[in-house]
Amino acid sequence: MMKTAKLESLWSPTFTLLCAAQFLGYAQSYVLQPTFPLYVTHLGGSPFVVGLVLGCFGITSVLFRPFIGYWADRWSESGVLILGLLAQAISIMICFIPFIGATMIANAFRGIGWAGMTAGGYTLLATSAPAARRGEAAGYYRGVQSSATILFPAVALWIIDASWGGFRTAFAAAMTMALLGAGVGVTLWRQTPQTARSVPAPSSEPWWRDILNVFDRSIALPAMLLFTLNLSVPCLTSFFVIYAREIGISHFGWYFVVTGTTSLIARPLLGRASDKIGRARSLVVAFTLETIGLLLLPVITTLAGAMVSGILYYMGSAIGGATIFALAMDKAPPERRGRAMASFSVSLPLSTGLGGLLCGWAIDFSGYTGMYLMTAALCALGLVLTGRKWAQLQ
């Protein structure tokens, strides 16, 4: 009886609709993932300029988290998610202007929308996931998000190269997905019981200090771990597609299909495993697999080799992401869940934004090989952090 109840509580209407909205939101992002680097280089930008464009996304996503987390607690988590998706759809319209500066503005505005979508989503996840199955719930949640990598980056490349397509068609496809996600969010808003939301106690501090006081120390360790885990993501996604074209790897869209399938299958399974073997051991496996995958990249010259490296990396990302998200849900104070999860979610755009800048700089300074070796070293720091905080992860 207890097992059945747990299964039913995991896949509640709230959790199901939340996963659907996140899938569409991530689908539009994965369409843009290979599109932005190719579009910027098409407009005459260098790899470093690509990094700047990607960095604009991370900067605004981080800066607006305090306001968004506060709003999620005081107003509505699902409402924040809906507005985030709408903001992303509007931002994509700016990309139709064929100017590098316009892509920076678009990505900056898109970062604000992304902050709303993810912060609202993480807060709803923490509210709806059963405490004993948070690793599994996080695995399914992240699996749904990453499942968009199976087809959508490859679809973006096919659209760009098609005679009937191009960059504008890819942008239009991404905008449509964001709007569909907002529609699902409206249904989620109507479905979510208002009594399930935690209303923070009134604060004696001025309202502006209450907003800016977003970061909760209890969430610091999960935030640092997530930052380290995802710092190398841009070199496996945005920059890898440029590298593959430079070294002559054809049909590269299949790389995204294979790695996306790996993420889809691995995240729920490995998320469940993280509940059983413990957080610390799961993180050792995660950072080790990511580091090995990155070290293989400098010697890869074929599509098959790229797939092997990607599979190892994304398996590490799968178990690491589920473990860290479960850890964050464990530590988030219920009365400040919106702001705590917003604080935690800062790590993702901050890591990918800074990672994009570092990768672009490393390519200009020492080439792609230097970039891959640098990111492997940074990823290995996660093992050091896990070892030093081992007692807190048990």
Image (cartoon, rainbow, N blue to C red):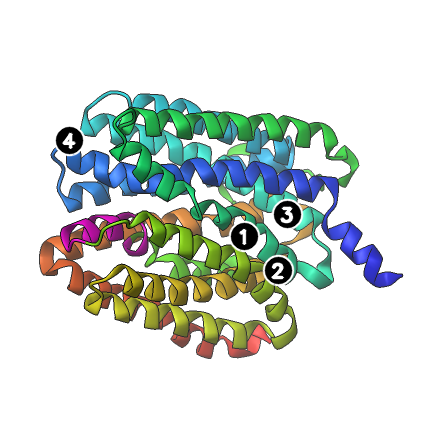
SS at circle 3: helix
Task: Tell me which residue sits at (73%, 56%) in the image.
Answer: 130
Using the rendered image of the protein, determine whether residue 203 is visible from the camera's viewpoint. Answer: no
Which structural element holds mark 4? loop
Looking at the image, is mark 2 or mark 1 nearer the viewer?
1
Mark 3–mark 4 CB contact (< 8 Å):
no
* Residue at the disc numbered 2: 331
Q: CB of mark 4 within 8 Å of CB of mark 1? A: no
* Quarter of the view holding residue 224: bottom left
In this rendering, does residue 136 appear at all? Answer: yes
Q: Quadrant of the N terminus?
A: bottom right
The reply to whether callout 2 and callout 1 are in contact (CB within 8 Å) is no
**Cα gap from disc 3 to disc 4, whole angstroms:** 40 Å
Q: How many residues crowd mark 3 within 10 Å: few (<14), some (14–19), many (20+)?
A: many
Label 4 vs label 2, nearer the camera: 4
Horizontal arrangement in the rendering, residue 197 relative to residue 393 (left or right)? right
Q: Nearer the viewer, mark 3 or mark 4?
A: 4
Distance of mark 2 from mark 1, alpha carbons?
A: 19 Å
User: Is the magenta region chiefly helix, strand or loop?
Assistant: helix
Q: Secondary structure at mark 2?
A: helix
Three-letter amino acid code of the residue under disc 2: Lys
Q: Position of residue 272 (x, y in %)?
A: 63, 66
Residue at the spot of label 4: 43
Percent from the top left, x then y, of residue 324? 53, 62
Task: Assess disc 4: are there few (<14), some (14-19) or many (≥20) residues with their C-alpha within 10 Å of its C-alpha.
Answer: few
Part of the protein shown in magenta:
235-248
Q: Nearer the viewer, residue 309 or 51?
A: 309
Q: Amino acid at mark 1?
A: Arg
Mark 4 vs 2, N-terminal side: 4
